[in-house]
Amino acid sequence: MPIALITGASRGLGRAAARALAQRGWSLIVDARRAGDLADAMRGLADVAAVPGDVTDPGHRAGLAAAVGRAGGLDVLVNNASRLGPSPQPLLRDYPLDEFARVYDTNVLAPLALIQLLAAPLVAAAGTVVNVSSDAAVEAYPGWGGYGSAKAALDQLTAVLAAEEPSLRCYALDPGDMRTDLHQQAFPGEDISDRPEPETVVPALLRLIGERPPSGRYRASDLAVPAVAP
Ligand SMILES: NC(=O)c1ccc[n+]([C@@H]2O[C@H](COP(=O)([O-])OP(=O)(O)OC[C@H]3O[C@@H](n4cnc5c(N)ncnc54)[C@H](OP(=O)(O)O)[C@@H]3O)[C@@H](O)[C@H]2O)c1
């Protein structure tokens, strides 16, 4: 049974991805900061190890690595947990530097730290790393300089990792707009009910994991054809 670790699985895309993989027989390790929300999100799924905690906490990351050890390996790491930053998002000239550092801690340092901790089992499995990116990584939207530049760093980190680790598949996945808490934070007070549900992105993720195209940056919209269950 393949094994995946998905960060930020209590709601949004992480929850949708975890439920889809669990329903396809995957063994999962998942996290989120709020333990109760994570337990609720994973209720009814078989073979899910929920490890609540903050991906920026080295002790929590060690707990995730220990769970991978107990599971006996790792085929797929999905770095999905993310921090938007202040809402509404400030212009760069006004961006509080302590919050800028927290955005980078969550969106860049924590994914790299997990890749480092889990490199051995991922390489042993000739596995897959999916780092969830954003169009804000490549588009210069005013106000998105903190989150967007962190996602750009994550994209480049993914590309270099792919060059350094040819036995792995390494993807930056841009999911597109989704109707989630993070998106609502980015557009405070706006009606976001026209945005697609995060479940609509799952076929693209399943396709990356199942078909394993060459490492690179992919937009979910470019992969949005019926997925083959891995
Ligand atoms: N929504 C969009 O329109 C959109 C567009 C482009 C890219 N993305 C990307 O898609 C991914 C998923 O976003 P989403 O919209 O699904 O977000 P979401 O609905 O807000 O869910 C975020 C998940 O991550 C967890 N989380 C947040 N910070 C964490 C931390 N420090 N440690 C551990 N878990 C943490 C949250 O639970 P807790 O709060 O309990 O920790 C929650 O489970 C993110 O990488 C985001 O940048 C989203």
Image (tube, grey):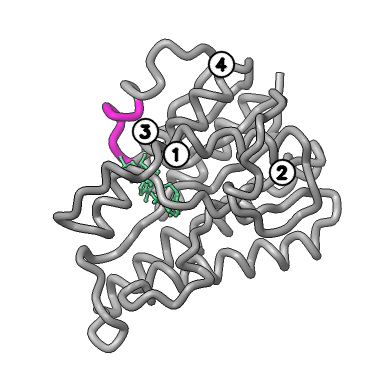
Left/right of residue 61 with respect to residue 192 in the rendered view:
right
Query: Label 4, on which residue?
Result: 23
Q: How far is the residue under mark 2 from the one under mark 3?
A: 22 Å
Magenta-drawn segment: 33-38
Looking at numbered disc 4 in the image, what kind of residue is underneath it? Gln
Can you tell which quarter of the image residue 154 is in? bottom right
The answer to which of 143 and 32 lies nearer the viewer is 143
Give the farthest residue toward the bottom. 93
Magenta highlight on residue 35: yes
Query: Label 3, on which residue?
Result: 10
Query: Label 2, on which residue?
Result: 128
The answer to which of 80 and 204 lies nearer the viewer is 204
Residue 66 image position (x, y, % from top left): 56, 35
Q: How far is the residue under mark 4 from the one under mark 2?
A: 19 Å
Looking at numbered disc 1 in the image, what kind of residue is underneath it? Leu
Can you tell which quarter of the image residue 43 is in? top left
Query: Which mark, residue 13?
Result: 1
For the C terminus, which image quadrant?
top right
- Is residue 116 visible in this depiction of the protein? no
| Tag 2 and tag 3, C-beta contact below 8 Å | no
Front label number (4 vs 3)? 4
Front label number (4 vs 2)? 4
Write the residue at 71% across / 18% down. Answer: 1
Q: How far is the residue under mark 4 from the one under mark 3?
A: 16 Å
Q: Earlier in the sequence, mark 4 or mark 1?
A: 1
Write the residue at 72% across / 62% down. Answer: 161
SS for dot 3: loop
SS for dot 2: strand
The answer to which of 185 and 1 lies nearer the viewer is 185
Mark 3 CB within 8 Å of ligand 1? yes
Residue 84 image position (x, y, % from top left): 33, 60
